[in-house]
Amino acid sequence: MGHADAMAKYGAKTLDLWRYSYNIGPDRGESMEDISKRVSAILEMRIIPELKQHNNVLVVCHNGSLRVLIRNIEKLSVEDVARISIEHSRPIIYEFDRDDGTFKRTNPIPTKAYDIEHSSLK
């Protein structure tokens, strides 16, 4: 079901509840908590080992999964990640420091919506 259909069926208030709540998701769907468990496992078991082997990794995913991935990489709180809005089809590029296991975001192409939201988090 697309966004417009979901809006017509459930309304903005319910869609916002699903998007901004950590442990409340759509019927038969995933909450951010559910997504976090899945994405955290992929980050730890697949992405970081590849980066430690000096390989580049491209992640393409839905907005909810991407927000959770950013939360893990940038060590954001649940409240902070709920406010992130990511522009479609804009890359968010990170460099991985193999020595200390940290990430640094380096966006050559600005992600306007993300940068505006992210800057208010600091």
Image (spheres, rainbow, N blue to C red):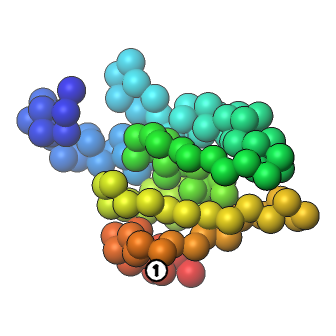
* Residue 118 or residue 13, whichever sits in front: 118
Query: Can residue 14 be seen at all in this image of the molecule?
Result: yes
Q: Which residue is mark 1?
A: 120
Give left or right: position of 32 versus 9.
Answer: right
Helix, strand or loop at mark 1: loop
Count residues near mark 1 (Cα–Cα under 10 Å), then give few for <14, some for 14-19, many for 20+. Answer: few
Q: Quadrant of residue 71?
A: bottom right
Q: Position of residue 51 (x, y in %)?
A: 76, 50
* Residue 68 or residue 47, whichever sits in front: 47
Extreme residue toward the front, this view: 55
Query: Can residue 10 be seen at all in this image of the molecule?
Result: no
Q: Position of residue 82 (x, y in %)?
A: 45, 57
- Say which residue appears at 57% left-offset and 56% top-offset: 70
**On-image quarter of the N terminus:** top left
- Say which residue appears at 46% left-offset and 29% top-offset: 30
- Say which residue appears at 83% left-offset and 50% top-offset: 52
* Residue 67 or residue 49, whichever sits in front: 49
Q: Quadrant of residue 115?
A: bottom left
* Residue 87 or residue 5, whichever sits in front: 87
Give left or right: position of 99 versus 33.
Answer: right
- Kind of residue sitting beneath label 1: Ser
